[in-house]
Image (spheres, grey):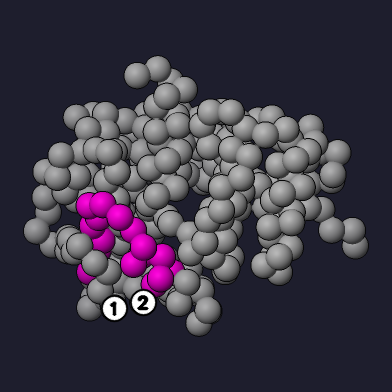
């Protein structure tokens, strides 16, 4: 598989690992909406193949999001940069630079630690840890719960407990034998103890057992600790990057 084909396979897998409540396809783009603060399920994303002229795509996306009372947001990966000039012209700013990492499953450091809990569905304690670290309000809690119920394919929610509470957690989804790592987090009071590495390593071990051929994830470009963690697990290949474009609001 060439690099472009692999990049689009990763695009699809990552999109399906975090499904949106509503998706509409138009002009070779998918307009996603869920509500809440998380950008990925609330942004316009490109699809492989032929896409419409930038002016038409942006007009359609702006109309879609305006119809839902939501500001338009575009997720622009390096593999589909054609909107950039028109977004510049319309005063859309840049934010959220993110890297896609990829590795073959045999290159990843997976294990089967007995004290890391693995479940096919999130427990209430897992949800509470996610909500606590993310500062979710009640609406965002409902959105996230709904999202996890929409996930298709093999999935696993992993957690590591210390002092009677979840100290580190993550979840993973396998789509077309590709593991997508999501929501990797360690509670502030338990960092620098290797718990995040062990928790993600357990998820990799589960994915290898479940037949995954490779793994991928998205990490914020300036998050040095997270990038170091993933490098230590074997995610050494940067596949491509993306960023978001949001309309600049005059003060």
Work out whether residue 119 or residue 219 is closer to the camera in this orientation and state it.
Answer: 119
Q: CA distance from mark 2 to mark 1?
A: 6 Å
**As drawn, 44 above or below 190:** above
**Which region of the structure is painted magenta?**
144-161
Compare residues 84 and 197 and report the one nearer the observer. 84
Q: Nearer the viewer, residue 145 or 232?
A: 145
Between 69 and 7, the one lying in front of the other is 69
Instruction: Look at 18% across and 64% down and name the residue there.
Output: 119
Compared to 22, does 7 lie above or below? above
Direction from residue 198 to residue 137 in the image, left or right:
right
Q: Is residue 116 left or right of residue 101?
A: left
Look at mark 1 in the image and give the residue it sits on: 124
- Residue 108 visible at all: no
Residue 111 point in image, percent of width and height: 14, 45
Which residue position holds label 2?
128
Q: Position of residue 101 (x, y in %)?
A: 41, 34
Graded by Cα atoms within 10 Å as few (under 14), some (14 to 19) or many (20 or more), the crowding at tag 1 reads few
**56 shown above or below 71:** above
Residue 87, located in which quarter of the rendered image? top right
Which residue is at a point 31% across and 61% down the rendered structure image?
169
Residues marked 2 and 1 touching at CB (< 8 Å): yes
Residue at image coords 42%, 55%: 18
Which quadrant, please, contains the N terminus?
Answer: top left
Does residue 152 belong to the magenta stretch? yes
Residue 29 within the segment the image draws in magenta: no
């Amino acid at each position: 598989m060439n690099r472009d084909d692999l990049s689009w396979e990763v695009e699809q897998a990552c999109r399906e690992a975090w499904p949106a409540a509503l998706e509409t396809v138009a002009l070779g783009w998918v307009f996603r909406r869920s509500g809440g603060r998380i950008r990925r399920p609330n942004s316009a994303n490109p699809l492989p193949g032929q896409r419409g002229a930038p002016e038409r795509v942006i007009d359609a996306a702006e109309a879609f999001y305006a119809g839902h009372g939501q500001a338009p947001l575009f997720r622009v990966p390096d593999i589909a940069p054609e909107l950039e000039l028109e977004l510049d012209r319309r005063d859309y700013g840049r934010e959220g630079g993110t890297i896609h990492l990829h590795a073959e499953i045999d290159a990843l450091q997976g294990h089967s630690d007995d004290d890391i809990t693995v479940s096919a569905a999130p427990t209430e304690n897992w949800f509470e840890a996610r909500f606590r670290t993310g500062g979710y309000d009640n609406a965002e809690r409902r959105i996230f719960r709904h999202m996890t119920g929409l996930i298709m394919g093999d999935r696993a929610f992993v957690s590591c407990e210390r002092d009677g509470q979840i100290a580190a957690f993550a979840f993973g989804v396998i789509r077309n034998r590709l593991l997508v790592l999501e929501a990797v987090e360690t509670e502030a009071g338990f960092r620098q103890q290797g718990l995040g590495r062990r928790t993600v390593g357990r998820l990799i071990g589960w994915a290898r057992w479940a037949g995954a051929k490779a793994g991928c994830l998205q990490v914020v470009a300036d998050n040095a600790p997270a990038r170091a963690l993933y490098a230590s697990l074997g995610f050494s290949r940067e596949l491509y990057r993306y960023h978001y474009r949001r309309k600049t609001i005059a003060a």
